[in-house]
Image: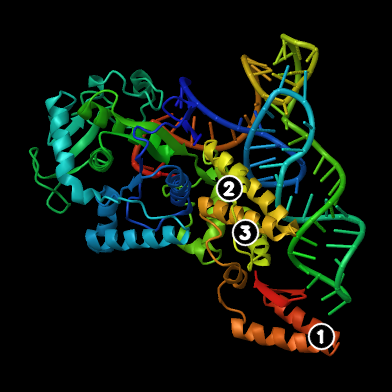
Amino acid sequence: MGLTVYNTLTRNRDAFVPLDPTHVRMYVCGPTVYDRAHIGNARPVVVFDTLYRLLKRAFPKVTYARNITDVDDKINARAKESGRSIREITEETAAWYHDDMAALNALPPDVEPRATEHIAEMIAMIAVLIDKGHAYEAEGHVLFSVGSMPDYGALSRRSQDEMIAGARVEVAPYKKDPGDFVLWKPSSDDLPGWDSPWGRGRPGWHIECSAMSGKYLGTSFDIHGGGQDLVFPHHENEIAQSTCAHGPGTFARYWMHNGYLMVDGEKMSKSLGNFFTVHDLLAKAPGEAIRLTLLSTHYHQPLNWTDDGLAQAKQALDRWYTALERVADVAPGDGAAELAPVLAALEDDLNTPAAIAAMHDLATRLNKADSADDQARLKAALVDAGALLGVLQSTPEAWRRGGESGGPSDAEIDAMVAARTAARAARDFAEADRLRQALADAGVTLEDSAAGTRWRRG
RNA sequence: GGCCGGAUGGCAGAGUGGUGAUGCAGAGGACUGCAAAUCCUCGUACGUCGGUUCAAUUCCGGCUCCGGCCUCCA
């Protein structure tokens, strides 16, 4: 396959050549489990899930690892303020996360390692870094020494001088260099801690990803993904830890970063408080519509989340499902040739907007097709394209009916439609139109055809 | 202050050195008891000032504006 990806490391669109063509390995930074996932958290999940689907199609084996960070000071703070146990909070939040991401049709990763289950690996890695002279112990902390690594800053393209000049935070006195970062820090008795050669403590943020990616994907693997905001310091520090521990030239070869999600032109983030959760959105829109909204902008661009954008994604899905329902009785044929433009768009650095445009073209031609052969090919292509983007996973009928939330039930609607059909048969159009209007007022649209009347919610 | 991105038609959003993105919205038409869905046809684009070129929205430079990173964040 001719996949090219924009590689943050080279600032270029590079041809994707896996280290092992029989086994592609990808790591994506997962959530810190202390609160509901917001829509900005969902963007990388959906983007890299789409990449995962594309890779699975092209390569015999793909291992996708996404961590769960379940040891973190934000979690500790949440536990303290709520009076609940850390374990309770992390388990509950991880379960929410799984539910929400599944509702967005995100496939589960092959491996989902938890930080607290890999403390031993982290301690071992830290010990190696100390042995090799890349880390030092100070006041119960273990710090990575950025001065020990000449290439530090290569991913984010910043020199150490710049970082010192731009530093806006107070530098802890025990740091040899202001850029040094924590690998291990001491825990007081009321905080989670593990015994280590440096006393009871807990890991710094960055070390878990280095330790767990190394364990599950090997010291070198293909793709490392995450949000753009992780480029510095998180990914820079992961590179520092992993390459200093495992040797030059190791670690991830392609670094892919999705752009921010904006709301009203501002970056959405937990710290700004202008976020809304996937869970809340799912109450007002189907998961597929949320997913398609996230894929409607190229992953590298900022995405401004709006209700209108969500509505447009819903309409696109309506259009595709409608096209598929028309050929519900047609068995899918060989759609490979018709799928090619969709595939080409996705292989071009995951150009999902272009892929969506190609799907619209498939739908238009499917709507026009009158030969069974054309219908079979185009239907297969549209269904396959949907599987690549992780949409069209419902049936057209189920999609059309939506969920029963308030308003008349399916049975009530069916009864009104039957009454209207009877009125029409009797040419009582006033009564027929009254029923149509009553349903319209309840958000139900009717579509008459030779085959009968269909209805849709929304 | 340092470093990154971006600026496309009413809206969203791809892309390209020279002809069509696409979707939504809008206008007209076909179809329909009326609709809806579908199909056909049609507007309105590439921030600004220069440069390179036969030709620039696309390449180069200045400017303006917007956003982000440099601190926990996807």
- Helix, strand or loop at disc 1? helix
Give the residue at mark 1. Answer: A424
Disc with the residue nearer the chain's start (2 vs 3):
3
**Residue nearest the observer in this picture, A57 or A390:** A57
**Residue nearest the observer in this picture, A302 or A384:** A384
Residue A363 in view (yes/no) = yes
- Image coords of residue A200 (percent x, y): 10, 45
Q: Which residue occupies 25% across, 53% down?
A: A76
Disc with the residue nearer the chain's start (3 vs 1):
3
**Residue nearest the observer in this picture, A47 or A61:** A61
Q: Which residue occupies 19% across, 31% down?
A: A143
Whether A455 is drawn above or below B5: the answer is: below
**Disc 3 chain ID:** A
For discs 1 and 2, the disc positioned in front in the rendered view: 2
Give the residue at mark 3. Answer: A317
For discs 2 and 3, the disc positioned in front in the rendered view: 2
